[in-house]
Image (cartoon, rainbow, N blue to C red):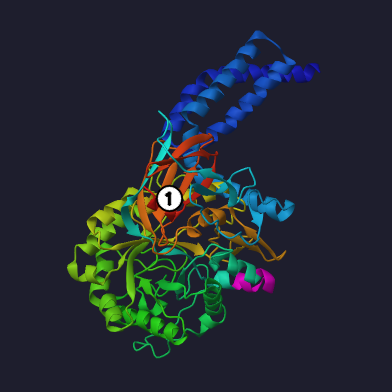
Amino acid sequence: PAPFSACVRAASSSLEMLWLLWPASGVAAALASNKVLGWMLFPICVLTFTSVTSFLYWRSLVSIIFCILCAGYWTYIYIKWWWLVKMGYRKELSEGKAWLTRWLYRKVGLTFYASPASPLPPPPEPTAGEVSIVRSARGTGERMTSVPPLKLEKGWPGKGQPTLIIDPTVRFQTHDGFGTAFTEASAKVLAEMSSANQERIVEAYFCRKTGLGFNIGRLHMNSCDFSDGNWSCCEKEGDAELESFTVERYEQAILPLVRRANKAAGEAVKLFASPWSPPAWMKDKPQMCHGGKLKPEWAATWAKFYVKFAEALKGKGLPLWGFSVQNEPQAELSWENCLYNHDEERDFIRDHLGPALKGSGMDLKLIAWDHNRDDLFLRAHTIYSDPVAAEFVYGMGWHWYGDPRYEWWADAAGMACFENVAHVHALRPDKHLWVTETCQELGPHIGDWTTAERYAESIIRDFNNWCEAWVDWNLVLNEFGGPNHKGNECSAPIIADTARDRVLLQPSYYAFGHFSRYIHRGAQRVLCSSSRDCLLATAYINPDGSLVVVVLNQTEHYKDFDLMVGGKVARAQGLPHSITTYIISAKDLDAK
C-alpha cells in the first residue's frame, strides 16, 4: 500500500544516514564496555529488519547497497567482536542454556544424551594378542559399549601416522581410587525413589561388576549448601568442651546411605570429611553463611571438633580415613563457608588441627587447600615451607572450578591451571594429590555431552600431572539439580527424577566409568605419549599386570592412530567426540 511504502521509504532514508555513523560509534562502544556491545546488537537487529523490509517494498539500488552493508557489518561484528559478547554475557548465556535444558526435560521429556539406568555389562577380559575396547561416543548411542577387539601385532607405526606410545617400564604415581560425596541432599533424594531405584543408584556407583566401582566417599561435617537447611553438630553456644556434640542427624539419611555403599562395594569405602563452616558461635560473624572467620579463641575447640566427629563416626562403625581442613577457604558465598588466607590455614594446621588429629590415635590424614587449581601452588608453597605444618599434611586437594569454558564467573584469561598440579608435585614429591570436588554448575545439565568431555579431559590432565584420586560432588540429585537450600543447583552423574521415579545416567556417568571400572586401586601410571593434540590420553598398569589406556577425542574429526606398546602395534580409530578405553593383557606385556 502507498502509505506503508512511503513510511518505509522515510524510515529507510533516515536509517541509511545513521548507518554511516554506526560502525564507528559501535566499535567505540565495544571498546568501552562489553555490556554496551551487547546493547549494540539490538539496534543492529532493527537495522537488519528495516533493510530487508526496504528491499522487499522498495527495490532501489540504495536499498540493495544498504542490505549488503548490513550483511557485511553483521559479519564484521561476528568475526571481530562476538567473543566480547560471549564473555560479557557468559552468565546470561549459561543460565539460559541451563533453563532451556531443564524446561525441555520437564515439559517434553527430552533427555539429549542421558539414558535410563541399567546395569553395566561386566568389564571385558583382555585376551593375549588382542586389545579389548570399550567406547562412548556422542551421537552414536555407544555408552561404554564393547566393540570388536584389535589385533596387537609386532611392528612399527606407519610413517607420519598419529601414534600413542606406551612404555609400561616407566612408572609414576599409584592410583588410590574414585569417589563421590554423601551429601544430605543426595541421601534425601535417594529416599524419595522407589526401593528398586534406590538399589539401582547405589549399585550403579559402587558395584565393580555392574557399576563404576567407586571406593572413596566424602562427608560434609556440619551443614553445606546441599543440606536440608543450616545446622551444626554442636549448636549450644559457648560449649568449649563440646558436651552437646552429636552426629545423630547423620543417622537420618547420610550414614544409612554410606552403609549401603559399603555393602554394594563389598568393602569399606574410604571416608573423609570436610567442614563448610564451624558453628556460628565460633566465628567473627555470628552466622555460618556469607563468609566470616574462625575466632582465634575458638581455634582449639574447633580442632577438637574434628576429633569428636571422627570418634562419633567410628562409634557408628564407619571410621574416617581423614579430613580436609576447610572446603573452599577463599570462597565468601551465600552458603556455608569460613575464610582462611594462606597463613591462617598454615597456622591453624600447625598450632591446632595437626596436633589434635595426631593426638587422637586414629591415624587420621589431613588434606589442605580443598579449593581451585589457580591458587593451589601458592597454598601448597605456604604450608610446605613450614616444616612443622607440612609434617601434619598428607597432601593437597583441589576443585576443578574456574575454567572459563564452563564457568561464567571465571577469569577469561583462564583459571584451569592444570600445570599447577605438577608444580605442587615438584615442590614436594613425597606428598599426595587429590581432586576433592567436581560438578557442573547451574542446574542438572540433563544429557549434556560437553560435561562428559570436561570430566574426561580433567581426569586425564590431572592424572598426567600426578593426581592420585578423584572425588566427585553429589552422588545423586533431583531433576532440578537439587535440593539446595541456597539455590546453588548443579549436575550429578546420576539424576533421579523424583516426580516420575525415573533414574537417568548422565554422559558424565559413562565418562567416569571409562576410568574407574578399569583403573584399579594400586594401579601405577605409566608413560604415555601422543603425536596428535586431539588424542588426549593416560595409561595405567593394574596390580594384575593388565594395561589400561583411556583416549579422549574432543574434536569433530575421525582420527585413526597406532597404539604402540613394547614393539607391538594395534591400528585404532578415534571417533569424533569419543571416550575410549583400551585394555591389554598382562601376557602381551610380558612377551618381549
How many discs appear? 1
Q: Magenta segment: does it hold 195?
A: yes
Magenta segment range?
188-197
- In the displayed structure, 31 sits above or below 471; it is above
- Kindly identify which residue carries mark 1: 588
By secondary structure, the bulk of the magenta-drawn segment is best described as helix
Query: Residue shown at 49%/27% (left/top)?
Result: 79
| Residue 498 location, quadrant | bottom right
Q: Amino acid at mark 1?
A: Asp
- In the displayed structure, 77 sits above or below 118; it is above
Q: As drawn, which residue projects farthest toward the bottom? A: 243
Q: Nearer the viewer, residue 411 or 435?
A: 435
Q: Position of residue 256 (x, y in %)?
A: 56, 79
Q: In which quadrant will I find the N terminus?
A: top right
Q: Nearer the viewer, residue 278 or 520?
A: 520
Left or right for 546, reference 209 = left
Left or right for 304, reference 189 = left
Left or right for 199, reference 463 = right
From where the camera sits, is residue 558 visible? yes
Q: Magenta segment: does it hold 281?
A: no
Q: As drawn, which residue projects farthest toward the right? A: 1
Q: As drawn, which residue projects farthest toward the front? A: 591
Disc 1, SS: helix
Q: Position of residue 387 (x, y in %)?
A: 18, 67
| Residue 533 location, quadrant | top left
Query: Residue shown at 27%/72% (left/top)?
Result: 349
- In the displayed structure, 353 sits above or below 161; it is below
From where the camera sits, is residue 234 visible? no
Q: Position of residue 76 (x, y in %)?
A: 51, 23
Q: Nearer the viewer, residue 62 or 381?
A: 381
